[in-house]
Each structure stands twice: as structure tokens, then as C-alpha cells.
Image: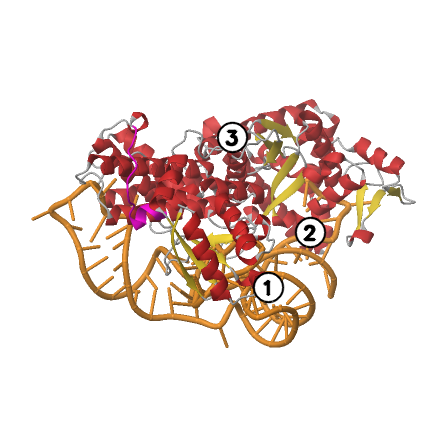
Amino acid sequence: MKFLHQAIAKAFQDIFDTQVTEEQLSLEQTKKEFEGQVTFVVFPFIRYTKKSPEESARLIGEYLKSRLNEVADFNVIKGFLNLVLSDSYWVDVFLEITRPDFGQLPSNGQKVMVEYSSPNTNKPLHLGHIRNNLLGYSVAEILKSAGYEVIKANLVNDRGIHICKSMLAWQKFGNGETPESTGLKGDHLVGKYYVIFDQHYKKEIEALKAAGKTEEEAKKQAPLILEAQEMLQQWEAGDEEVISLWKKMNTWVYAGFQETYSALGVDFDQYYYESNTYLLGKDIVEEGLSKGVFFQKPDGSVWIDLTPDGLDEKLVRRADGTSVYITQDLGTAQLKYDDFKMQQSIYVVGNEQDYHFKVLFLILEKLGKSWAKGLYHLSYGMVDLPSGKMKSREGTVVDADDLIEEMKQTAKEKTEELGKVDHFEEAEKENLYRMIGLGALKYFLLKVEPKKRLLFDPKESIDFQGNTGPFIQYTHARIQSVLSKADKDLSSIEIKRPETLKETEVELIQLLSKYPVILTSAAEDYNPAAIANFAYDLAKAYNKFYQTESILKVEEEDLKLFRLKLSHHTALTLNKAMHLLGIEMPERM
RNA sequence: GGUCGCAUAGCUCAGCUGGAUAGAGCAACUGCCUUCUAAGCAGUAGGUCUCAAGUUCGAAUCUUGAUGCGAUCACCA
């Protein structure tokens, strides 16, 4: 498109004797109802042309048509100059697309860390974590494809009072249960005891309230919570028995998480454990004090005053010298940077922590950390149920493992209804159900812009038709079917340039050619939804082409080959795009 | 109450740095499988882009205010 910018700038020079820079010009895609593929809006420039919009557009149109082979024709409607580019030009564009490196941007020498998942080790993963994991994974893949070197990091929240609750409940009521003895996945077993703790704790609170205590008092004085707090202290003191119980239960949880991660197809390059990092940040507090960024209150607690920035005063160290949440995050941020020296660091964390990250980044900036400007909080909306928020203690969560299983089951039912895979081997069927079920789930979660909140109704199953993952997978399988029937090695065949193109072919080529642009902007915005929408548009455009033109039945061998090649590169691009969302594409379905 | 985010068809969502008559999917209704996979294609119907002012040739998009929903404002994480 650059040639058009140049030519239009030159047109202003030649026709109107006025300077318009290429940067000022913007071209957009012509709306479907009009003829042409590219539109130049002249309204903003009539003050340079000193002519009516129509007249200006007509003059530029004529200029372009007479000088550029690529411009076959034009039409003017009001101030819109619609350009019809030649079929030969679109064939050139297509040849660009067939280059082997199409869709992978060259390395930009930048390193970026994407932290996502960050689970608590006291309960299994749920739908909220799934959104987090898929977003993080996808953003990481998008950045890789856009030329970054990416480190996927997971910060495991494996310590603290909540872990002690599960441990205590297991100790008291567990009767030595293990994942092996119960057949439960490790994270589910530990989660079970987290719930059991809460049940007993609530009973104790009720008993205390009946004895005349207030709610507040009861919550603080219940024997179980006191015991859990004591256990936390023992843990921090390195008590052997507590540590060994902690290790045992964490091992169960990690095994369980790993299973869920691999079912989801997400992975990590680097794990950080809070049990290792929770003491970090103490030297940053000292640094802040000596730099005068932090100040101390009479009771000894350390604060930062962010009121000039429109925020509040924030505590960074308690009066008793212990850290708070943000302290260890300051330390961990430093640790990550020291480990990798990356230019950007992205935290994929829910929007409930918007304020926390605003404060965190601001503090690091005030401390003069050169790398603070590369920090970014990729904030995503909560996943809500029709009944409201998911609450693990109340059991109103959509469990990750259950949901994955249900999706496969639904995929199986829908596929069997269609009866197209009856002759498949059992293993291929199972794999197909997995791909389709997960494809539907992943697409459902990723097609929506991250910051928007998401409503999930367990009673309504996720669609398999229309703007969905399976639709795109189906399109891919359909193309593969055509290609395998053709039985040609397309990569080694030189195609002859077609003289003319059909409308659906031009549409397809134009869409395909946009892929690198979409990829770039998706990487800039950390937005997988842009990729999802592109894949959908591409699949739709292919289906339209498929329905209007025949491929294998055409007489002329050259045309057949061209259409096969077009199909082939559509499939490749669909595959690339969906791969960025972590969605696998079946060869047949 | 302060701050931040969101608001587009009955439902779920697109809408690029302001541009043409605001687009898809689901749900509803009509057509299209003796022809390359009908999880598809084509069509009908469905809108005060929450409301009000402003900026301008032009606003769903930018500004301000209002309303509604959500989050957050812990010596919790």
C-alpha cells in the first residue's frame, strides 16, 4: 500500500501544487456495498485542494488511474475516492503471501517476560484461572510471532495463611488421605481440606457468637484460625514437621496443576515461588528510605506518599518490620529484572488488582528503576456466573478440570450427531473431541477483549456454530480435505499467474495480506481478540469463496493449481492465527 | 464518598488513528446437499450505539456532565 501513499502525495503536488506528507494520508478498506478495495477519504484535504470534495476526488482518481498500472479503475461518491486495484496487483500480493517467512515477523532484539497463572496452592484452578492462563499464553505466543524473545513466568503463591488452613484441616480431619488412596487429583484433595477448614471455622464462629461475642471477635478468636496462624509462624521458623507437611501437600498440588496446564496446553519457562520471594523487597525498603522516597512514621512503619499522584499513602513495611504484599512484589520485580534484563514485563492479573499495580509501578518509577517503564499490567475482566461472582469457599466455582472434561464430552456429542467420523480410529476420534472441545472453550474466552468482563452460564453450552472455534477448525479441515483430494505437492509447484481474479479471490487475498498488520497491532495491544476476529473473518471469506467457485472441478489446470495454492495458504494462515490462541487445527473432522 | 473500568440488535460480541446507509454470530423465519465436508452458504426480520451538552464539513468513536453495572480505596494476598 505504500506505493499508493507515495502516489497520492505526488498527486497533491502535481495537481494542486501543495505539500501533503505520506503520514497525513490514510487509506481504508472500501465498504462492501461499493466497488473497489481501497478508499481514500478526501474531506480532510479539501482545504489544500481548494476544490469540492467530488472534484478533488475525481482529479486524484484520474491521476492515479493514468499513472499506476495497479489502479484499474475508480469511482467517486461524495468525498470518497474508491480505488479498484488490478487483478494483476492482487496476484502480486498473493505471491508475497506465499513466501515461507510470511506471518513471522523478524526478531526485534527485544526481550519480554509474561507472567501469568500465579495460582494459590490451596485450591484447584477454576474458570477465572483458565481465562488468565489462555490470555497469558496467547499474548506470549503473539509476542514471539511478532519478533520478541519471550519468557513465560509463573509466580506460585505457595505460602501464607491460606495454605496453612488446608494443611491444618488435613492434619486434623484427613486420616492420612492421599491422592493415591482417594483417587483424587492432588489439587482437588488439598482444595477439599480448604473447604473443610472453612466449614469448621464457621461453626466455631457461630458457637462463639452464641456465647456473646461479636462477629469480629469471633472471627479473630476461633481456635482454628489461631491454630492456623500458629502454624504459619512455625512454617516461617522452619519447623521440620510443618515444613515436611507443607512440602508433601504442595507436591500433590503441583502434580495436579501440571495436569491441568498440560490439558490446557499452556507452559512456562520460569517458575518463581513466593516461599522464596516473600522476604525480598526488604533492601528496596531501605533503598527507598535512603533516597527519601519512603518515610517512616513514629511507630516505625514505612510508607510512601502518593497523594501528589492522586493516590493514597501506601504502607510498604509494618511497624514490626515485616513485609506486606507490595513489598515482596517490589522485590520480585527486581529479581525478575536481574534474572533476565528484559525490556518489557507483563503481568497478566485480574482487574481487581488495578490499584495494586498502579501503585507498584509508580513506586518503582519513583525509586528510579530504569526498567520500570517497561512494566505493564494486562488487566482482564472477571468471569462471572449468572449468580454473580465465583467463590471457591462457597463452592460456586466452575472447576477447570470439570469444564475441560465437559467441553470434550459436548464436542463428542455434537460430532457424533453429524455422523461424519464414524469410520475414524478410536484414538483419532478422542483427539478430535479434545481439539474441538478445547477449541470452542479457548475461542469463547479469547475472542472477547481482555478488559471486558465475561459472563459464563454453565447451563448454556458454548456454541459450536457461527463465530466459534469449531467453525474455524471446520474450515481448516475442509481445506485439508480438498488439498488431499488434489494430491499435489503445492510447495514445489510453480503456479502460473492467472489473468483475472474472481471477487471472492480478491477478498481472500486482501484479508490474508492483512495478517502481519493484525499481528503487529495485537502484539502492541496485547490483544488476542484481534487475532480471533481475524481468523473468523478469514474463515468466513474462505467459505464464501468455496461456496461460489469450484476448485477441483475447474478445467484449466493452471486455475485449479492457483485455487489450490490459495486454499493452501489460507489454511496455513488460519493455522498460524489459531496457534497464537493455543488452538489446534484438525486435518479432518 | 474518592478513584478506575465498562455500557452498541432479545442474547454474545466486532467496529482500525473521528468518515459513506453502524456490522457479525446465536435465537426466529426463507431458500440451497444425485456437484470439492451443510459445524457451511445465500436471504428476511431485528438499532434513539445508556442519556444530555460540546468540539467539526462529519461523532458509536474525542471532551464534559449525568445514569446504571463492576472493581478498588486493608499493618489481607
Q: Is residue A495 magenta?
A: yes
Q: Secondary structure at mark 3?
A: loop
Co-location on one chain, circles 1 and 2:
yes
The vertical placement of A79 against A492, above or below, is: below
**Magenta stretch: residue A294 in it?**
no
Q: Earlier in the sequence, mark 1 or mark 3?
A: 1
Residue A267: mark in rendering: 3
Mark 2 or mark 3: name the one nearer the start of the chain.
2
Q: CA distance from mark 1 to mark 3?
A: 56 Å
Q: Which residue is mark 2?
A: A208
The residue lying toward the viewer, choosing from A304 and A387, is A304
Residue at 71% from the left image edge and 51% from the top image edge: A218
For badge 1, the amino acid type reads Arg
Q: Amino acid at mark 3?
A: Asp
Residue A259 in the image: x percent, y percent? 47, 30
The crowd level at tag 3 (other Cα within 10 Å; few <14, some 14-19, many 20+) is: some
* Amino acid at circle 2: Leu
Which residue in the rendered view is the most extreme toward the right? A298
| Residue at figure coordinates x 46%, y 54% from the top left | A63
* Range drawn in magenta: A494-507
Mark toward the viewer: 1 or 3: 1
- Residue A1 makes an appearance in the image: no
Looking at the image, residue A476 sits to the left or right of residue A51; the answer is: left
Residue nearer the viewer, A165 or A111: A111
Looking at the picture, tell me which residue is in the foreground, A345 or A195: A345
Identify the chain of the residue marked 3, using the numbered disc in the image: A
Main SS of the magenta part reads loop
Chain letter of the residue carrying label 2: A
The residue carrying pointer 1 sits among few (fewer than 14), some (14 to 19) or many (20 or more) residues within 10 Å by Cα, namely: few
Residue A47 disc label? 1
